[in-house]
Image (spheres, rainbow, N blue to C red):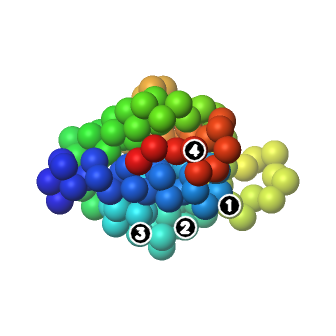
Amino acid sequence: MNNNEIVEKVHNSIYQQIQKTGIATPVQVLMDLDILSKEDYERWRFGKLDYLERACKVNLSKLSFVMREIRSYAAKNNLKGSWTFYKQWGQKNSPHAKQLRFSKSSGEDIEKAYAIHYLNPSPIGGQKN
């Protein structure tokens, strides 16, 4: 998949998510682009993978490009970012439920970029693609 195809697919994924639920997430974009399988996402959520990027089917350079494009699309379309805490599944109401890692480095900016959910502040249908 070349960069132009990635841009188009990222835009379409976010647009479709916003149309459907009013919220777009980077993790869902990765699944929509077949970079991350649903099975691997679930393994990560249950704590069977130490970090999400390990399961992604592209190199870090391509992954960084996808993440930059998500932020760019969100900014151009005035989507509001909302940080979301990702905790391990299967630890219901446990004070020991651990926060999941997205990246090997656990860099603050990288972790935040994955955890931001984008909300449409205007009515559904007001989005540009």
Which residue is most to the bottom?
A: 39
Question: What residue is rendered at 59% in x and 51% in y?
Answer: 125
Q: In the displayed structure, would residue 98 be above or below residue 72?
A: below
Dot label at residue 36: none
Identity, as a three-letter code, of the amino acid under mark 3: Ser
Residue 99 in sight? no
User: What separation in Å lies between label 1 and label 2 (alpha carbons)?
Assistant: 9 Å
Q: Which residue is mark 4?
A: 126
Q: Quadrant of residue 95 in the image?
A: top right
Q: Which residue is mark 1?
A: 89
Q: Earlier in the sequence, mark 4 or mark 1?
A: 1
Identity, as a three-letter code, of the amino acid under mark 1: Trp
Judging depth in this view, the residue of 29 and 97 nearest the camera is 29
Q: Which residue is mark 2?
A: 42
User: What separation in Å lies between label 2 and label 3 (alpha carbons)?
Assistant: 9 Å
Q: Is the Cβ of the residue at disc 1 closer than 8 Å to that at disc 2?
A: yes
Question: What residue is rendered at 82% in x and 52% in y?
Answer: 94
Q: Earlier in the sequence, mark 1 or mark 2?
A: 2
Q: Earlier in the sequence, mark 2 or mark 3?
A: 3
Identity, as a three-letter code, of the amino acid under mark 2: Glu
